[in-house]
Image: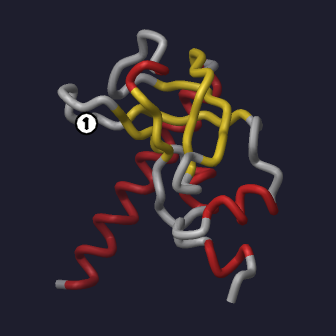
Amino acid sequence: NKSPEAAADGSGSAGLASFLSLDGRRFDGVVNDGRLDRDFFFIHCPVISRIFRHVDVFIHSKQMNGFKPLDFVNFAFRAGKTGKPAANDLRACSSRGSELLRREREREQRDKERAMREKE
C-alpha cells in the first residue's frame, strides 16, 4: 500500500511530507538533549511528532546556528535524504511558541507516566 497514510510511521515520509505540502513550512520545537560528540541532533516538534508517529526532526550540527540542546527553536521543514523529517534555517522560537512547547512537553511526560502506571 503506497498511500501517504501508510507511510505515517516515518518509513515513507517523503510521500507524506509531499502530500501534506510540508516542505518549507515553519514549526516550533526543542533541540533534544543528545550527545554533543555527534554531527547531528534531533528536534522534538509536537506537530511533526503527531504527523509522523513519534519521529523527531533531524538537523546536522552545521545548521545549528549557535543553538544548543534544550533550546527552543523555530525551523523550516524539509524531507531529508531518507525521506524522514529534517530541519533547516533554525531561528529563535517566539516566547509564545516556547510556552506552548513547554506545556506540550509536560503533557507528553504525564501521558508517558500514566502509560507506565497502567502497565504495572
Residue 82 image offset from top left, x and y in percent = 52, 55
Does residue 39 lie above or below 63 as drawn?
below
> Which residue is located at x 46 percent, y 34 percent?
59
User: For mark 1, what is the residue?
Assistant: 34
Q: Is residue 8 left or right of residue 118?
A: right
> Which residue is located at x 62 percent, y 21 percent?
89
Q: Amino acid at mark 1?
A: Gly
Residue 66 image offset from top left, x and y in percent = 42, 10
Depth check, front residue: 110 or 49: 49
Residue 78 image offset from top left, x and y in percent = 66, 41
Does residue 93 lie above or below 85 as drawn?
above
Give the residue furthest to the front: 81
Q: Is residue 111 left or right of residue 78?
A: left
Residue 108 image offset from top left, x and y in percent = 43, 56
Q: Quadrant of the C terminus?
A: bottom left
Depth check, front residue: 88 or 119: 88
Q: Is residue 48 left or right of residue 21?
A: left
> Which residue is located at x 33 percent, y 65 percent?
112
Q: Quadrant of the N terminus?
A: bottom right
